Image (cartoon, rainbow, N blue to C red):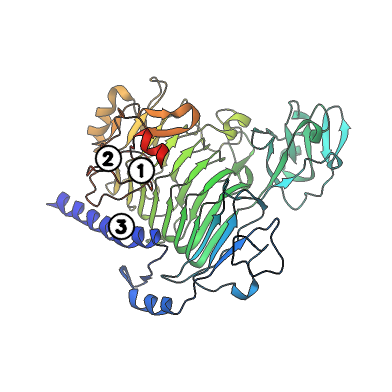
Amino acid sequence: MIVNRECMIVILLQFFYLLTFCNAFTTKKIISFDNNNKSKPTFNVAIKQAKNIVRDTFYLDPIQGSLNGNGKSPSSPVKSLPDSVWGKPGITILYKKGIIVRGDFSVFSGIPHAPTIVGSYGKGNKPVFMKSINLDSTKYWIKENGNIWKCTKNLKETPCANVIYNNDEYCGAMRWRKNDLKKQGDWYMIDTIGGKFRFRDALYIYSKENPAKLYSAIEYVPTGNFHSFKGNDSCIIVEDIHIKNAGTHGLWFNGGHNITIRRCDISFIGGAVFTPRIGKNGLWVRYGNAIEIWKKGRYLTIEQCNVYENYDAGFVAQGSCGADCIDSVVVRNNVFKNNGFDNFDNSWGKSISRVYFENNTCINAGDGWAYETEGRPRLSEFLPDTIGWHIFLDSFSLDKSTIWIRNNIFYNATGNKLLKVKKLPVGGWSNVHLEYNCYYQKNPKDALVQIADAIYGSNNFKEYQLRTGKDVHSIAADPLFVDPEHGDYHLRSNSPCINAGFINKLKVNKTGLSAHNAERHDIGAFEYVPKAKRLLK
């Protein structure tokens, strides 16, 4: 009866979540929750407030938009949101597709049933928002000696986290001493003389000629978050934009509630130096996550995003300030690829509650620019072993946390495990639910799972299931993607992930395509749809 009762509680929570959050977000509404009773929506006040809201849409083109118009037509966008509407609930802010904005997007809190929405309009690629500084003019570079070039642009107030060449073709390798600049594209901005660290006032690059002549683009990525949600930030939807080139974290939550991030791309985040911590090689640790919830954040949804080429984690929920500080977070139907540390991380702090990591497709943990520029293990790492897992859990709070990790594909982690639990807490981890996942390593010799000191591969995966009681309905098999070498992670018709997920009688449509007919979800970010129907869509 205990097991049945726990299952019923989970089903009811999921049912409530689907009826409120899923329905609310897909209809561009957000539900408010009473602070004293988190399971009771306060509909009446929200509906009364929303009835009097004028829901205006504004079209923005920060590059070529007008300075004088009202921005209410896609044919006559304005450069920025009019001051007269700033802070009003129910506002939709749409940025023109195909543009590149060097800075943040405009956003502010809405109210329940009248959220602030940030999105895009028109044809072409998603609008790109980046925090990097362009250095591809020859006037910015002077030759110091040999093949060492000094940047003349004042960058002292923005310590470097990364240098990206030729429109994301590759990143330069950070060097800790000027004398270590020996390969094309190496960069340096930090001294380690006498065992002390200091930021230099200039950027130095190794290049056989003026870097601006050799490279078509040079992007200097400064330290700092791309966007921070704090305190009472709430009732916000951000969708259909591309966030990139921030040196610390991409989207950072230290508070906030009822916020959805949907169909966004998040890439080339991180690489900043974390001065409070010295790594195992005597170097400062570098860090930076695509999406981080730090200490506080409730009723957050991250869905249908592409999160790739980030220094550390794709998603982190850690550092909780106490019970329910991080609560009711859903991360679903995303593709995580080539993130340097892991894709789901809960490795420090107090307990987190009702965090759902579901139906994600996770590719090549530990790969990407962090590995390519530092090697494996990374030069500045603080852990004693090689990093690069899809899931990394520590013992700090597992006994008190409620985490669901299910219906995910964990595909390849070169030379490492797909799942690692560093240490089991004394109180156990019964509320950490691992289920209906697919584990696969391209090299069959690479292990799949490590639980404390016990290591399990495809040959003894059943032993892992029996000993831990986790992943009982999970599989260790090739998910059979359509074309993984070219980034198509839809399932082939003979994939073992089809109809292999958890039973969901609500038949929620996760992809925007037709809902699957079966009661079971497919495993991964994409429900199986025949190729002809996908092309038609």
| Residue pictured at 27% horizontal, 61% vertical | 16
In this orientation, does residue 13 appear?
yes
Q: Looking at the image, which is closer to me, 485 or 468?
A: 485
Mark identifier at residue 359: 1
Mark identifier at residue 18: 3
Q: Report crowding for label 2: few under 14, some 14 to 19, many 20 or more residues within 10 A (C-alpha).
A: many
Q: Report crowding for label 1: few under 14, some 14 to 19, many 20 or more residues within 10 A (C-alpha).
A: many
Q: Specify the amino acid type for callout 1.
A: Asn
**How many numbered marks appear?**
3
Q: Position of residue 329 (x, y in %)?
A: 39, 55
Distance (Cα) linking label 2 and label 1: 9 Å
Q: Is residue 52 above or below residue 521?
A: below
Q: Are marks 2 and 3 in contact (CB under 8 Å)?
A: no
Q: Position of residue 48 (x, y in %)?
A: 39, 80
Q: Is residue 518 above or below residue 231?
A: above
Q: Secondary structure at mark 2?
A: loop
Q: Secondary structure at mark 3?
A: helix
Q: Is residue 506 above or below residue 444?
A: below
Q: Secondary structure at mark 1?
A: loop
Q: Are marks 2 and 1 in contact (CB under 8 Å)?
A: yes
Query: On the image, which quarter does residue 526 sit in?
Result: top left
Say whether disc 1 or disc 3 marks the residue closer to the N-terminus: 3
